[in-house]
Image (cartoon, grey):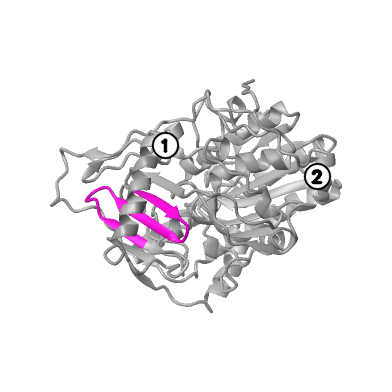
Amino acid sequence: MKFLTSLFLFAFGSSLLAADKPNIVFILADDLGQMDIRAFNPKTFYETPNIDGLAKRGMKFTQGYAACCVCSPTRGSIMTGKYPPRFGITNFIPGGRTGKLLPAPNAGQLALQEVTIAESLMDAGYATFMSGKWHLGNEGFMPKDQGFTHDASAATGPKSDMKKGAEDPKKTDRICDDAIAFIEANKDKPFYAYLPFNAPHVPIGARADLVAKWEAKAKQAPADAFGDEGKNKVRLVQNNAVYAAMLEQLDTGIGRVLSALEKNGLTEKTIIVFMSDNGGLSTAEGSPTSNLPLRAGKGWPYEGGVREPLIVVAPGVAKPASTCDSPVISTDFYPTLLQLAGQPLKPEQHLDGVSFVPLLKGESAARGKPLFWHYPHYANQGGSPNSVIRDGDWKLIEWHEDGALELYNIAQDLSEKNNLATDQPDKVKELHAKLIAWRKEVGALMPTPNPNFDPNAKAPTESPKKAKKKELKKSQAGNAN
């Protein structure tokens, strides 16, 4: 068992949770956009009543961010409380697409030297459980090697997707069954249950009866519409019946887990976190959803790629149906959960995390430092190597292929349509200097020139219509197996 000496103990006040260690259930969706959830977007095509119910019971964060626009780095940031460059996973594992540049090296696993939030809670007497998509390494670097005493990931991870089980092609129900069994077996002791679902990641799929239901509803939805995002097409409407069915199956499963907590008398002593690992998929691989008014989606540094549906239920701490507009990021979960559990913080471990317990209590924001992203890779969804800083309302994007800089005022321009770099040269200079200094501080690896790059070679392209047909075929085949 790995251990780091704790330096600071934060008093928790008179909250109900201070008297006893609260349980923690961390629900992580895969490729779910903020605009997919009705609690964040009343006009969404989809229906997620159980997730929306969490927002009624706790605090909704309108500016909750993932530490990366793709999955593995964000997952690592949740585990470690660090920005991805610090632990060497800056792309999904094993991504390695090239272009004008060669991507920076990308670690194939989360190093065992990292002390994860699961290990810290296990040291504090928590039973720790994980079922679903790990995506932080294979044998020798699995959840059981990183602090999860109950590890059901092998039977529920993405490799099992769509292979068998027309009733449960994304293993959503299986993950929930495992979680419910764990909750019932550990109801008399504190536990940490991490549920990283495979849905709604492609290939999309759900039960045939749900798909049929949503196909009927989709007839009343807007017709397909696409715009341009770089060299890619970006979906402008939500109308995908299979995606909607998959979300319904996910939402129903989450409802079952919540019911298990209630049945066992644990509702008022359980903290629930709900989030996604990156934005919705809107520019490739069938483009099943739209993130509007947020720009772009998964694989891009714009808001559609990194702004997530974040909800935290903390009985006795967060006021029900409350909203927080202060930015937080996935590195912040580690210290936040430790503090909510009444445990000492570990600043030597969660170097980049800032506890947002004060925000949960309705107090003023206290982060006091910018947010950063570093993605020195080519995304499958069209994005190219970039780094980003968000300081206050200002957001600067640096594109590494040509050094181009984009500046946006997020408070005034949520959709990032108005690049102010030319109009605000001093602000660009200030933010760029901070971004460069941060990269140096965290040891961020950079992409390098590609000696074999052929500027005249055409990248493979696929029309949105053809991609959607192909995706539908895949999902139908999966439901038939």
Magenta span: chief secondary structure: strand
The numbered mark at residue 297 is: none
The verdict on residue 389 being magenta is: yes
The image shows residue 41, relative to residue 428, as above or below, that is below
- Which quadrant of the structure image shows residue 469? bottom left
**Image position, residue 393 (x, y; %):** 46, 61
Tell me the residue at 47%/52% (across/down).
202
Tell me the residue at 38%/63% (across/down).
408
Q: Is residue 331 visible?
A: yes
Amino acid type, callout 1: Pro
Total tally of numbered discs in the picture: 2
Q: Is residue 379 visible?
A: no
Q: Which residue is mark 2?
A: 17
The numbered mark at residue 85 is: 1
**Image position, residue 72 (x, y; %):** 47, 40
Amino acid type, callout 2: Leu
Which one is nearer the viewer's eye here, 63 or 89?
63
What is the distance, in whole Å, between disc 2 and disc 1 at their CAs?
Answer: 34 Å
456 relative position to 339: left or right: left
The residue tagged with tag 1: helix, strand or loop?
helix
Identify the magenta region.
Answer: 387-407
**Image position, residue 97 (x, y; %):** 30, 42
Circle nearer the N terminus (2, 1) = 2
Tell me the residue at 42%/70% (across/down).
236
The image shows residue 91, relative to residue 415, as above or below, that is above
Q: Residues within 10 Å of mark 2 (few under 14, many from 20)?
A: many
**Image position, residue 164 (x, y; %):** 56, 44
The verdict on residue 8 being magenta is: no
The image shows residue 304, relative to residue 11, as above or below, that is below
Residue farthest to the top, as pictured: 1
The answer to whether the residue labelled 2 contacts the one labelled 1, judged by CB atoms less than 8 Å apart, is no
177 relative position to 349: left or right: right
